[in-house]
Image (cartoon, helix red, strand yellow):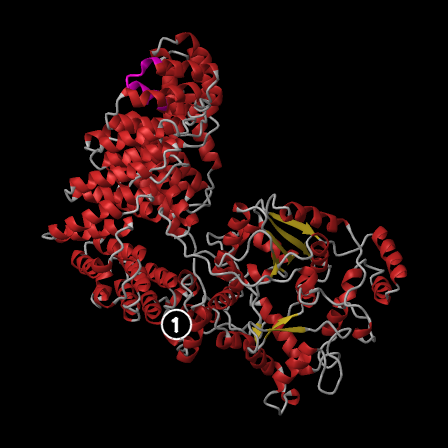
Amino acid sequence: MTDGAAQGALALLRKELRQARADQGWSIDRLLARTAAQGVPLGRTTVSQALNDGHPRPSSRTVAALARALGVDPAPLHALWERASPRAAPAPAPGPPRAPGAADTGPALLEVHEAPLPGTDPGTLPFLTPYLLRPHDEELRHALAPALAEERSVLLLATGGSSTGKTRALYEALCALAPGRPLLRPHDHVGLLNLLHAGEAGPGQVLWLDEAQRFLHGGPVAEEAAELLRRLLLDRPGVVAAGTLWTEPYQGLVARPDTVADPHGRVRALLTSPATRKVAVPGRLTDAERERWRRLAADSGDPRMSDSLHAGARDGRVVQHLSGGPELYEAFRAGPGAHFSVAEHALVSTALAARGLRHYAPVPGPLLAQAADAVLDARHRSADPDWAAAALRSLTRGVRPDGRRTDIRSTLTALVAVRAAAGEEPAYEPADYLEQALRAEKALPAPTPALWRAVEEHTTDPHMLFAAAQEARWLDHRKQAVLLMRRAIAAGHPHVLQSLMLALPRDSWQGEEVLLWVADHAGLTRHDGIRLFLWSLHDPAWPEAGARIARRAVAQADVTDPDEVAALLSELGQIGQQGLLLARDPVTHLRLPEAPLAARLLHLLSSRGHVADAVRLADRLLPGADLTRPDLTAELLVALRAAGGREADVAAVAREAARHVDPGDTESALAVLDELVEAGEDDAARLFAGRLAESADVADAESVGYVLDGLRACGGMPGAAVRIAERAVERCDLSVPEDVAFLLDGLRAHAVGPALTRPFVREAVGEGDVGDVTGVMLLLWSLRELGETAQAARLLDRAVRESVGLSDPEYAACFLQELAAHGLARVVPQVAERAVEEAAVDRVGVGFLLRELRATDRPELLARLAARCADSSEPRVAGQLRQVGQDACARRVIDRALDRTDLRSPHAPARLVAGLAAEGELDAARRLARAALDADAPSPDLVAALRKAGLPQEAALLERRLADRPPPTPARPGPTSYGLETDGTSAAPWRWSDLPPVDEDWCARARAASRETRWL
């Protein structure tokens, strides 16, 4: 798992714990009492750090203890805890030789358009015309300079229409500022992803992304590449990426979709990142710029400058005329038999129509040939079987065999040949200016039935198949959409199933038959795709489909490959089907893996109860096991202990572990220590604890506290704790009170005496940061439990004098209580007034502050805080206001919640009813039900929520309204629920069983391509 995914899992774990605590409405003290009552006492700081972001991952014991205390299922929390541990990434491969810079590469290879003069031999003029600097050039250079100086990183995008000079502007900027800096030029989104995974992009280079739509349209691969690039730009200064992007794709990619699915979420995050700078390149010259262009043309004597100025005199589109874009557009619009032959025009039209089907990848030649041939009439079909290849050569080379030109100005061709590698068959892209000009006029050629068939038969990229299927669905070509989605699934696309179900006709829906087909035919090409297929088909309502695809995944697995076995074991474990794989006895057959993977395999077996298999694997691993690795050592001990009767082997591993395990990874080392204690190997445990104490990081109070907390969880190791304290006294950073509290809690748990604790106390109280009430209170409680009452009073005094921040309402309430308890009642009114102004009223803990103000008889302050809370729309806040007698403010909260709820949403009203019911606001829930009835906006979720809230009459009214409503009308309805044929006629009724089978030869080719795709 990547670091980003691990951080996301950790954030979600903490969110779930906070929500569980909020549902109970417990204070920290109440939660601590619950954990202690259940035999797992936790420190305040341990709990605080488990609940709040910005701290290391809590231990599994802490998570389990909190789950039990809060009365929630520990299994999902433990799964999140496991996902929150990132696996080490493989070392990057050696980088390629140094790439040439912009000046050495030259404009042609960087796809700067040549500007030849009509009728002139291109060889008699320079490749480029003189360059006119315009305001956007200054913007580009201003954005590049800090990144080139490694002050920050940038993705610099020149945006605008086609042939406006975007690529030329970037080229000139790089030649001016960094002519020799190596340029990395990936071919497409796959090349970009591979380059980023290999770690080749970094400071000192330029990542060249001309025509960035090639890299941003590409399904999950493009999404993953975008995410890696975004993180690289944000994490490391000096990274420079530069590219061009048409305005329309840019706007489409940054716009949020109307649906839950977000196919471009990570691309949009990249394009809207603080590291991304967009510079618009205008499509027209101003009057002043045209005058400067005229003078530059006269001074240079370059006739191309004068001719383009004359051609663009009417509309200001001077730059476009340099490359001949408008002339190409006019040549195409002249129709077949004019500039282009009938066959050539058919091929260009087909390539443009394929773009309209979201086929953003280069189009294969056989696809173009099949679709174009179908639109030619018999008189124009060639007798040459290779007619399409010959016409495509003429179109891409710009000249026919007889010497007549197909290009514009001997340079600009209607189609461009693209090869993924030297010697491969080409695919084809239409000229970008031609495509964009037609798209702007909504004049792209319409897809023909032949094109739909050709896309279906010749496209093997699963993402392109799904994109075309979505376009077919939009056009109400339901059968064609289903045919394409079937192929996408057969090729290995795991995200299609829901869309497929929605595209099927309701009149003849065959859910089980469809799922069984998917189970039998889905392309199981990659571990990530297999995982998603397994999850998609794991449904108690359709058990046979889930069982079939699991059996297929197991049958094709290479049980000698430890990576494949580990991945499949993990996924099958999520759906309770590990036994299918274990029946093939991978433990006997797999190649013995390296230590990290061996540890993971042992954990997967032991944690799912497959003890016998775990022991057999442990026995295979033991003879050559690397017992310096804490992860492997811990899992070996788990397996051997579970086996029973293996005391001698446990003792031998324990002895080796105590002497040789590397304690540098604190979390894994603590896991080893825990297993040594559980095994009863006390001598080995004490020896290893001593080694851990000598190697622990003592420069950071939080790290010291983490080790001490781990030692406490292992039954207490006072000698190791004392040694850590001795090492930390002179080295530890004690500026963060919360971290110091964690450290002191650990020392107190090990009964470390005042001779060692007081140096920490004195420095933290005298020099620590008292800017936040949370840290101050945690440290104060730790001091009180240590008996350091005088130092606690000093800390309170400092916090008051230095105006501690009171944004956390729960801890602010505790602070007010402590002031009163320590005889500082004189300052309580002023501090309470600040708390009312500073407290974050959107936090769950605001109820604690409200109750404190009421308990201390401060009605004015209570009313002010209540008024601030009244701006909320959370039912929970209304409940807290009612508890302190602030009914008017509570009603305002309820009114605001009702006003802000979108009654048309399928889920929001139901969530609000649940929240209102939890706070006893049943009258408000009835109001919401009436409003939904008046707005004719019932939903099944709302009906269910009302029933659960104890409002059966309101639920029944809405349920009757639901039953009376006509079925929804599709956004673009066809004449029937069966949709339209691709020729526009109404489709006859059809069923899933009527569809033709998918060709197995095609499946083999498509799955080979799909193996190169990463699925998110």
Instruction: Give the residue displayed 50% in from the left and 60% down from the top.
Output: 193
Front residue of this view, candidates 684 and 147: 684
Q: How many marks?
A: 1
Q: Toward which corner of the image does residue 312 lie, by quadrant?
A: bottom right
Instruction: Give the residue displayed 41% in from the left and 78% down from the top.
Output: 996
The amino acid marked with disc number 1 is Arg
Instruction: Give the residue displayed 62% in from the left and 58% down from the top.
Output: 182
Query: Can you identify the residue that label 1 sits on?
Result: 991
User: Is 692 left, or right, of 293 in this rendering?
Assistant: left
Element class at badge 1: loop
User: How far across and how far down the image is residue 109, in percent?
Assistant: 67, 67
Q: Toward which corner of the image does residue 158 lie, by quadrant?
A: bottom right
The span picked out in magenta is 779-790
Q: Main secondary structure of the magenta part?
A: helix
Question: For residue 788: magenta?
Answer: yes
Instruction: Say whether residue 548 is visible.
Output: yes
Task: Give the residue at the far left of this rendering.
Answer: 645
User: Is 476 left, or right, of 89 in this rendering?
Assistant: right
Task: Determine whether 75 is above or below 767 in the image.
Answer: below
Locate the C terminus by quadrant: bottom left
User: How far across and how far down the image is residue 952, in percent?
Assistant: 30, 40
Q: Toward which corner of the image does residue 250 lie, by quadrant?
A: bottom right
User: Is 901 left, or right, of 299 in this rendering?
Assistant: left
Instruction: Give the residue displayed 74% in from the left and 73% down from the top.
Output: 411
Task: Determine whether 821 is above or below 203 in the image.
Answer: above
Q: How many residues crowd around disc 1 within 10 Å: few (fewer than 14), some, or many (20 or more)? A: some
Question: For residue 86: magenta?
Answer: no
Front residue of this view, candidates 470 and 420: 420
